[in-house]
Image (cartoon, helix red, strand yellow):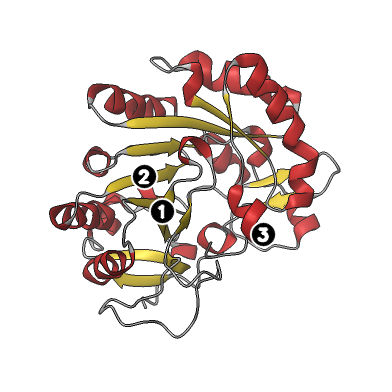
Amino acid sequence: MLSLSLYDFTFTNDCLQMTNDYIFLAPEAIFPITKDDNGELLKDQPATKFPVPGTLQGEGKMAGVPVLFLRTAGCNLRCMWSLPNGEVSLCDTPLASFDTRGEKRVEVEYVKNIILQNIGMMNHLVISGGEPFIQPFGLTKLISELKEERKIHVAIETNGTIFNDELVNGIDFFSISPKLKNSVPTIAKLDKTKVAIPFDPEQIENTRKNIEAIQSIIDHCNENLGKDFQLKFVVQNHDELTEIEETFLAHLKNWQPDDVVLMPLGSNPEELEQTRMIALETAIERGWRFSPRLQITYFGGVAGV
């Protein structure tokens, strides 16, 4: 473990060049798994309570597909949303975004072996975060080495604020989730949640929208056969629909209505109940996709599922 935490890390290419052989991972890291890097059975059962590794992708175009997850640590945003009832919904992966002091600095070789020992009959790896694009070098090496041993389909979940020419080459599916104004942390939200995080609201507001980065991913997919993307928006009211269309979609090109995914805001069943119908109605009205959150429906949204 490095003494320097991603909690205090400044993400620059120079810093990240030092981690080509390592990846910073969240506490749950690679999941759900049943074997170690040597193929030996682990003592504890996965959080899914199944005796086999893997789970289902819970969201978007790939919902229902058997996958293995790799969760990176660190994020350049600190998302927290206001719910219709006035409560605050934190990012559903807080230990990968808000407070990464529990992160693990893991060798790429070790991560590769864990994945290969557990992927079994599945053919899909999902790299999530945090924000994976803040550490592209270790991930680029990992994906390259994995694909040398097995023709694995790799998806990545990103907030669409960063583009990296090398990392995108190994990715087959991009789940781009641009963050709306409601996601920006504020003092009022922090007071309600009692979460202590280092953040600069103005910096996050200026960072959360990067049309050029999103368009670069879309163009990359359209220029490379077999690649796909989705634009996944988390919504909870009608005003956000205008924001989606005027702030993002109006400035992007070469996307289809079927590429736009609406997902109700919420990290538990009670929160989803407040926001589900607006997402359903709008998806039908505009010809967009509605995304379930199967990990919450079937596993309660606990870590590691």
Please provide percent x and percent y for residue 214.
41, 29
How far apart are the two marked residues, 2 and 3, measured between alpha carbons? 23 Å
- Give whichever of 303, 165 is nearer the camera: 303
Crowd around label 1: few <14 · some 14–19 · many ≥20 (10 Å): many
The residue most toward the left is 148
- Residue at x 55% of width, y 70% of height: 47
- Give whichever of 129, 181 is nearer the camera: 129
Contact between marks 3 and 1 (CB within 8 A): the answer is no
Please provide percent x and percent y for residue 54.
43, 61
- Residue at x 47% of width, y 73% of height: 51
| Residue 22: mark in rendering | none
| Residue 300: mark in rendering | 3
Please provide percent x and percent y for residue 274.
80, 40
Q: Closer to the N terminus: mark 3 or mark 1?
A: 1
Residue 6 located left or right of residue 142: right
Q: Amino acid at mark 1?
A: Val
Q: Is residue 188 visible?
A: no
Kindly identify which residue carries mark 1: 67
- Look at discs 2 and 1 and give the one toward the viewer: 1
**Quarter containing the N terminus:** bottom left
Q: Closer to the N terminus: mark 2 or mark 3?
A: 2
Total marks shown come to 3
Crowd around label 3: few <14 · some 14–19 · many ≥20 (10 Å): some
- Classify 302 as above or below 153: below
Q: Closer to the N terminus: mark 2 or mark 1?
A: 1
How far apart are the two marked residues, 3 and 1, measured between alpha carbons? 18 Å
- Residue at x 52% of width, y 13% of height: 250
Kindly identify which residue carries mark 2: 155
Rendered image quadrant of residue 6: bottom left
Residue 3 located left or right of residue 109: right
Contact between marks 2 and 1 (CB within 8 A): the answer is yes
